[in-house]
């Protein structure tokens, strides 16, 4: 059973949290339901933050909820530091839930609703996840300054605009299109993607490689970096015509087979053209392990900063990368969990 000291701490925290919540107008939101099978990357507090920011609540209420969430994250992390090995950890959590519930006149079993959910969601598992994510991001995220960002985009633009369509140039064009359009290098640019101009800096993309047939047919409006829509269409056509002219190509070729045929040469292009741009960061002590998929991550990071910095990162990139599903009634359900894997770089 929790000690008197812990119960007192829970009561004091509850008073502070509820005061902030009431000042914001007592906004009610439900904490996101965790997946039945929880992946290691899933972080309920981050998902909840995104949902708050994207909600239709007044700004004052959003700010109040976000302030409460920050207070709760800090409290949970401190609890985790001191009591993670305690056999009473779940009871400690219940004492917080009870203290908050009594102050606001709610049933303590209503654990997914604000303000109770802030401190109790998934007990302290969420707090543990926050600590691990925070440590990982602090250790591994790679800073991209404006000079490097421009160098990456300029490199991709110059490679795409090459007139030569030798095998070597085709590999670099496919790779560079991933950076400038965010589409997957092998499965989409190599096989399923279709581009059509939409606006001065946007394309209509079909051919989403992951997900249902409905997703593959769905039109996504996506931003492009550095080149015009017509140049992107032309480069994709050149890549696909070259692939379709290979003796190993057939109309029934699979995504995995396309990857096997292109992977070695495209990786060589990555190491030849893009990895050298990261040498200053490596000399500064950053661990640089560049993959083709990292160019898609760079695309997402650059687009968010340039086009929608006011929006939630995971929510925005989920939209432009196609991290969504189609519900039973045809509604689009954005999935931010996948987007959390893309937080490898940040702009400085």
Image (cartoon, rainbow, N blue to C red):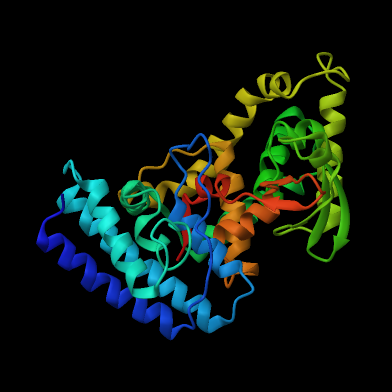
Vertical placement of 33 versus 291: above or below?
A: below
Where is residue 38? Give x, y as percent.
48, 37
Q: Tell whether 172 sits left or right of 273.
A: right
Q: Tell whether 310 sits left or right of 105.
A: right
Where is residue 331? Give x, y as percent.
78, 52
- Quadrant housing the C terminus: bottom left
* Tally of numbered discs: 0
Vertical placement of 80 versus 250: above or below?
A: below
Residue 186 visible from this viewpoint: yes
Which of 252/336 is in front?
336
Q: Tell whether 7 sits left or right of 246.
A: left
Where is residue 201? Give x, y as percent.
78, 64
**What residue is shown at x 76% (from left), y 45% (from top)?**
162
Which of 271/302 is in front?
302
Where is residue 124? Give x, y as percent.
31, 50
Q: Quadrant of residue 257?
A: top right
Which of 88/195 is in front?
88
**What residue is shown at x 27% (from left), y 47% (from top)?**
90
Which of 187/105 is in front?
105
Residue 207 visible from this viewpoint: no
Q: Tell whether 226 sits left or right of 133.
A: right
**What residue is shown at x 62% (from left), y 49% (from top)?**
335
Q: Quadrant of residue 104?
A: bottom left
**What residue is shown at x 60% (from left), y 63% (from top)?**
304
């Amino acid at each position: 059973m929790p000690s008197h000291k812990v119960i007192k701490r829970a009561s004091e925290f509850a008073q502070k949290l509820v005061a902030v919540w009431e000042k914001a107008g007592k906004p009610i939101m439900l904490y996101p339901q965790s997946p039945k099978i929880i992946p290691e990357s899933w972080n309920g507090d981050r998902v909840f933050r995104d949902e708050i920011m994207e909600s239709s609540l007044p700004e004052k209420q959003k700010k109040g909820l976000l302030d409460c969430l920050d207070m709760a994250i800090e409290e949970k992390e401190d609890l985790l530091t001191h009591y993670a090995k305690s056999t009473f950890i779940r009871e400690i959590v219940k004492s917080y839930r009870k203290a908050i519930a009594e102050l606001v006149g709610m049933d303590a079993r209503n654990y997914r609703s604000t303000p109770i959910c802030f401190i109790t969601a998934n007990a302290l598992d969420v707090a543990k996840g926050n600590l691990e994510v925070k440590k990982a991001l602090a250790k591994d995220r790679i800073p991209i300054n404006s000079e490097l960002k421009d160098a990456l985009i300029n490199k991709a633009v110059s490679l795409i605009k090459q007139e030569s369509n030798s095998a070597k140039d085709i590999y670099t064009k496919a790779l560079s299109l991933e950076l400038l359009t965010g589409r997957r290098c092998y499965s989409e640019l190599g096989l399923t993607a279709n581009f059509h101009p939409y606006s001065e800096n946007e394309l209509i993309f079909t051919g989403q490689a992951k997900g249902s047939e409905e997703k593959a047919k769905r039109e996504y409006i996506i931003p492009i970096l550095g080149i015009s829509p017509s140049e992107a269409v032309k480069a994709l056509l050149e890549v696909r015509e070259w692939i379709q002219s290979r003796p190993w190509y057939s109309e029934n070729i699979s995504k995995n087979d396309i990857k096997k045929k292109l992977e070695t040469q495209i990786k060589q292009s990555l190491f030849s053209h893009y990895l050298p741009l990261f040498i200053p960061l490596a000399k500064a002590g950053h661990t640089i392990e560049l993959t083709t998929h990292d160019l898609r991550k760079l695309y997402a990071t650059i687009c968010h900063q340039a086009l929608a910095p006011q929006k939630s990162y995971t929510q925005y990139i989920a939209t432009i990368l196609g991290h969504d599903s189609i519900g039973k009634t045809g509604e689009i359900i954005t999935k931010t969990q996948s987007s959390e894997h893309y937080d490898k770089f940040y702009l400085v």
